[in-house]
Image (cartoon, rainbow, N blue to C red):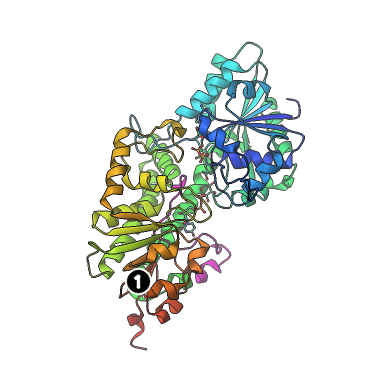
Amino acid sequence: HPPVRSICCIGAGYVGGPTCTLLAARCPHIQVTIVDVNPSRIAAWNSPPDPLTGELTGLPVFEPGLGEVVKACRGRNLWFSTEIDEAIRAADLIFVSVNTPTKKSGIGAGYAADLHYVESSTRRIASVATSSKIIVEKSTVPCRTASSMRTILEANSRPGIHFDILSNPEFLAEGTAMRDLQNPDRVLIGCLDTPSGREAADRLGEVYENWVAPERIYTTGLWSSELSKLAANALLAQRISSINSLAAICESTGANIGEVAHACGLDKRIGPNFLRATCGFGGSCFSKDLLNLVYLSESLGLHPVAEYWRGVLAMNDWSKARFAQKVVSTMFNTITSKRVAVLGFAFKKDTGDTRESPAITLCRTFLEDNALLSIYDPKVPHEQIWRDLVNDPSRPSPSPYPGSGGVLLDSSLDASIASLKSSSRVTLASSALEACRDAEAVVITTPWDQFRTLDWQAVFSQMQKPAFVFDGHSGFLDVARLEKIGFKVQAVGRGPEKMDAWL
Ligand code: NAD
Ligand code: UDX
């Protein structure tokens, strides 16, 4: 393989877009083309800057810092295109960065990864490529997927053309993607232990070495690399479920989960990160990858292993339900016709992504209990919130951009949205303060910085009394300050004050 001069990325989503944009910025000598089957997504990546501010506000993915980098590289060595075949032919190296959602039907439904998009991309590469290439699995896939890709490529490629397959999973987190990509803890490259496999891994390593220190680039076997991605997400999710289980004990004993997490995190073997108790984890990866791991374990006949990881998901479901239950029980066991302000709808701050957001589960539960909701999120488009509120989780979920991911909005979904809108049970507010007007409770579902610095005195004065605040992220709000204003506050992992009465 010659040094890489031209890269194609198939899939212009949350991973493909930011990853290859940063790559283009750090490698001006490499031409980078990001392609997608969804023309509206590509059009959004090519949208012009706002004429007043000069900022790129129309991009399909919101990530702090992303717009500036796209602006600097687009049209120089970075291109967004629907001309998939042309980009494949021109590339020395191709990232496959398409979605791998949980299967909604058929064998393995509810657990297994749907590899349809990976397979169709692979077949397309095989059928149109006219020269040898390095194919890089960027999507998160079950262990040994590279083997299937190799079989498809070998069976369908033109004579004399050779493909090497690498696994190069992505570890970025949304909201901090640009920082994570610029300064990754590690870059993992999995390859076959053959001269050609090792050479392909060297070529990809050289690309990363344009900005990543060589000691942070770790090369392993293909299957270890594939499994490491599932394993890393499973371990991270397990940490959150562990701390959330302890938060429940705190709430019943008067211990404080912030203090417990800090005390445990001081042990170097445990470490301080990722120990924030919350109303449950969300995001497109943790649940999907845990389910994938459970399915893999079941298929291998390793039932206790499957049960072990299933427990992490069960604890997460329970954490969300427990938090919702706390809201209802604290508000005198009924929220019927009470206005509840929900602050935040994205699954974490600094993103507009709502996939698996705990806010969706909580809002649906509150609606089932006949509450009136006022929802505010600084980045999630209103249409997305309506879709998430009515979409039945047992059906394929529409992806954030209509038409992407292969699922189109259907008319029954439109009808459900129209009916919810006309019921006046949900109001989408344009500021946090507006959402809180006349509310009996404020529920913090996403820890956006602006909610911490809100004028809480003003919030209090316009709410019904008693004014309740429920903090779904331990340690996020200054509880003592809020209580001084007059709020009745419940925060995840914080026991009731009366536990200390004997002092
Ligand atoms: P996404 O849904 O945002 O983007 C995937 C894109 O691929 C879509 O725009 C879709 O239209 C496109 N696509 C599907 N099939 C295609 C085809 N045959 N040809 C061209 N384009 C096609 O998904 P994402 O969040 O970017 O995730 C992509 C992969 O990366 C998944 O496997 C995911 O598990 C993994 N991952 C995601 C994250 C994250 O934070 N979102 C982090 C690490 C890894
Ligand atoms: C995750 C992984 O962190 C990343 O490495 C992988 O590539 C993709 O999946 P992401 O889902 O984007 O990234 O965000 P992350 O910061 O991991 O947060 C996921 C969820 O966990 C959020 O809902 C967040 O609120 C929750 N969380 C995180 C906690 O509940 N407690 C914590 O201590 C940390």
Q: Left or right: where does residue 96 sit relative to residue 3? A: left
Residue type indicated by callout 1: Met
Q: Residue at x 55, y 14 (%)?
A: 156
Viewer-proximal residue, 60 or 16? 60
Q: Position of residue 457 (x, y in %)?
A: 44, 76
Front in this rendered view, residue 224 or 90: 90
Q: Nearer the viewer, residue 54 or 443?
A: 54
Would you say 404 lies left or right of 211 here? Answer: left
* Residue nearest the observer in this picture, 468 or 214: 468
Q: Is residue 468 above or below residue 396?
A: below
**Which residue is at 66% across, 23% downward?**
133
**Which element type, helix, strand or loop, lies under badge 1?**
loop
The verdict on residue 263 being magenta is yes
Q: Is residue 208 above or below residue 114?
A: below
**Which image quadrant for residue 146?**
top right
Residue assigned mark 1: 463
Asked if residue 151 shows in the view, the reply is: no
Is 2 on the left or on the right of 424, as rendered?
A: right
State the residue lying farthest toward the top. Answer: 159
- In this view of the protein, can residue 370 be seen by the observer? yes
Measured from the top left, where is residue 268 in percent x and y? 58, 65
Q: Look at the image and give the residue range highlighted in magenta.
A: 262-286
Residue at (69% x, 26% y) in the render: 92
List x then y, in percent, for residue 248.
Answer: 35, 66
In reply to whether residue 387 is colored magenta, the answer given is no
Residue 361, how many percent across, how many down? 34, 52
